[in-house]
Image (cartoon, grey):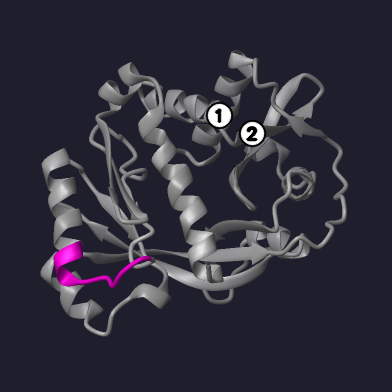
Amino acid sequence: MDLVELAEVVEANLMFKITAIEPSLLERLGITGRRFGRGIALSLRNDPSQYWSRVQGLGLDGPVTAELIGEVVDFHRAAGTPAAHFHLPPAVLPADWDDIRETYGLEPGGTIVKLLRDDAPVEPAESSLRIGPVDPADSDGHRAWADIQILAFEMPDPEGLLAEMLAALTVVPGFQAYGAWDGDKLVATGGLYVEDEVGECVSASTLPEYRGRGAQSALIARRVQDALAAGCKWVSTETGKPAEGEQNPSLDNMQRAGFKPLYDRQSWVWRP
């Protein structure tokens, strides 16, 4: 397995776990999914943020062709997806990608930096906040963990359905939620998903008034430590690529913890 495949598969498999949460929540959010080889398509028909419907992992076990993209678009059209984000690493894009994307109306979206680190030890990071896992039995803690992400990213969620979905994801096999606390108040979040020998760090968010206190640096270091203790040989993560001349503090935190940029992944947005 090459490094691109290793990094993409674990992320795609985590996203597909959303299709296994509580059936009533699947119905309310209109969640459906389909596998395309090792790739996945995930649709949230009733997602007010239009962020979570996506396509990942295509091209890892066969070429990305016009026919394949057409099948995936047909899935999203039939599912009533309001917008689907195709996350395709540059290594899988065919020579005729521009023609394919124009045929199916895929427009350029944001760019993600995909990062990977090996199993070298990580130095702990200092923080004035208490860092640790969220108790798997603490349902209120999981909902608070989810609510912080909705607030921190200013994600539209008028009925609280996306927060319910994130809280439900914390109890799927292989996933552990982490937090940073100021006393008894949860103020920052992170997540770790472990599959085979690969860990995936996700769900980094901090309430605005608590930024700059080392929460994310400490959460990254703790999750890497726990991933290595669980037998991971690799740990992957991703964050937004900063505009030219700007910085992304999340990217800086990741690189300080030993993550190295693997590639920039342009997203492509389909709308019906």
Left or right: 204 in relation to 230: left
Tell me: residue 111, above or below residue 24.
below
Residue nearest the observer in this picture, 57 or 201: 57
Q: Quadrant of residue 208?
A: top right
Q: Indicate whether 84 appears above or below 159.
A: below
Viewer-closest of 13 and 210: 13
Residue 156 appearing in the image: no
Residue designated by label 1: 170
Q: Which residues are magenta?
A: 61-68
Secondary structure, mark 2, is strand
- Can residue 85 be seen in the rendering of this structure? yes
The amino acid type found where label 1 is placed reads: Thr
Circle 2: residue type = Gln
Label 2, on which residue? Answer: 176
- Tell me, yes or no, whether the two marked residues, 2 and 1, touch with CB atoms within 8 Å: yes
Residue at (63% x, 19% y) in the render? 141
Q: Residue at x 64, y 32 (%)?
A: 177
Q: How many marks?
A: 2
**Near-viewer residue (36 or 122):** 36
Tag 1, which secondary structure? loop
Q: Position of residue 89 (x, y in %)?
A: 42, 69
Is residue 119 found inside the magenta-colored segment of the image? no
